[in-house]
Image (cartoon, rainbow, N blue to C red):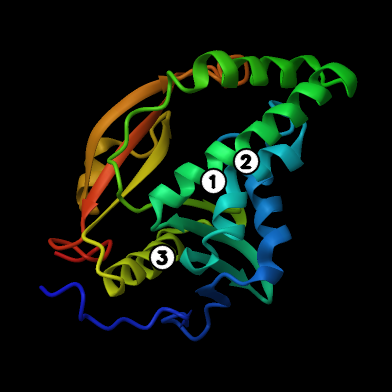
Amino acid sequence: MNLTTKKVATDNIEPSDPTDKVIIRKYCCKDREALRTICADTGFLGKPIDPVFEDRELFADFLTRYYTDMEPESAFVCERNGKVVGYLIGCCKPRLKFWYHLLYDPLLFFKAFYRYFFKPYNAATKKYIQWVLTRGWRETPPAPKDCPHFHINLLESVKSPNTTRRLIDSFLAYLVSKGHRKVYGQIVVFGDRRKPALFRRFGFEVINSMEVTKYKEHYPSKIFLFTVVKDLEKRPLLYSK
């Protein structure tokens, strides 16, 4: 398969079912605040991040700002009745992202440092920051270098296999149209959700995983972060063979 010449339309992907009010489309600047709100509303295992980390602004800055401000062309949103209810943010320029965080993250650090002592943050938020500084980097599994990646979040009201497939397939088709051959994601796994067999069903290979302890006081069971990789030459879409 010639990945560099395959033509895929990704600007507006209409629902296959005309009665389905959910559409998948490319991200635009007017979606920024809605995307940031969803990030905070789903930040704690699909629920609002507030009980764990109260600073929604800083949380959204760290997790979404690069994607919305530096690489918006690689982002997609899920919209229902004119309202953004989910998103997929992707990175096809990992070196740019590296330099962005190298330059921008110190500013986030100083904001967090100031608010830690002078706002001040509550006890749960302080513990979360302590985890980020002392354990976060150690509990993040390795990822492939110079490889595109993505993050996906949907509000509970629109979560479904069909919506998730359409959103991910839109990004995968975009990658193929740009000539990319692989993509990875780092997926939170807890309880009975997202077992390795499920990833394999969709053409993803689990290459490593690590236990994440940042929610230990808020969730009774173990939580893991899996790094999964998909070969787009073999399976360019989620359900393709």
Asked if one can make out residue 239 in the rendered structure from this viewpoint, the answer is: yes
Residue positioned 70% across, 35% down in the render? 107
Taking the spot 57% from the left edge, 51% from the top edge, the residue there is 66
Position in image of residue 222 (x %, y %): 44, 19
Residue nearest the viewer, comparing 79 with 125: 125
Comparing labels 3 and 2, the label whose residue is closer to the camera: 2
Q: Quadrant of the C terminus?
A: bottom left
Q: Which mark is on residue 54? A: none
Residue 131 percent location from the top left of the image? 59, 16
Q: As rendered, which of 94 and 44 lies closer to the eye?
A: 94
Q: Cβ–Cβ below 8 Å for labels 2 and 1?
A: yes
Residue type, numbered disc 1: Tyr
Picture coordinates of residue 129 (x, y %)? 66, 20
Q: Residue at x 61, y 35 (%)?
A: 105
Query: In front: 113, or 176?
Result: 113
Residue 162: mark: 3
Disc ID at residue 100: 1
Q: CA distance from mark 1 to mark 3?
A: 34 Å
Crowding at dot 1, Cα within 10 Å, few <14 / some 14-19 / many 20+, comes out as few
Q: CA distance from mark 2 to mark 1?
A: 6 Å
| Residue depth check, mark 1 versus mark 3: number of the one nearer the observer | 1
What is the secondary structure assignment of the residue under circle 3?
helix
* Residue corresponding to mark 2: 104
User: Is residue 230 toward the left or the right of residue 43 in the image?
Assistant: left
Q: Residues within 10 Å of mark 2 (few under 14, many from 20)?
A: few
Q: Quadrant of residue 77?
A: bottom right
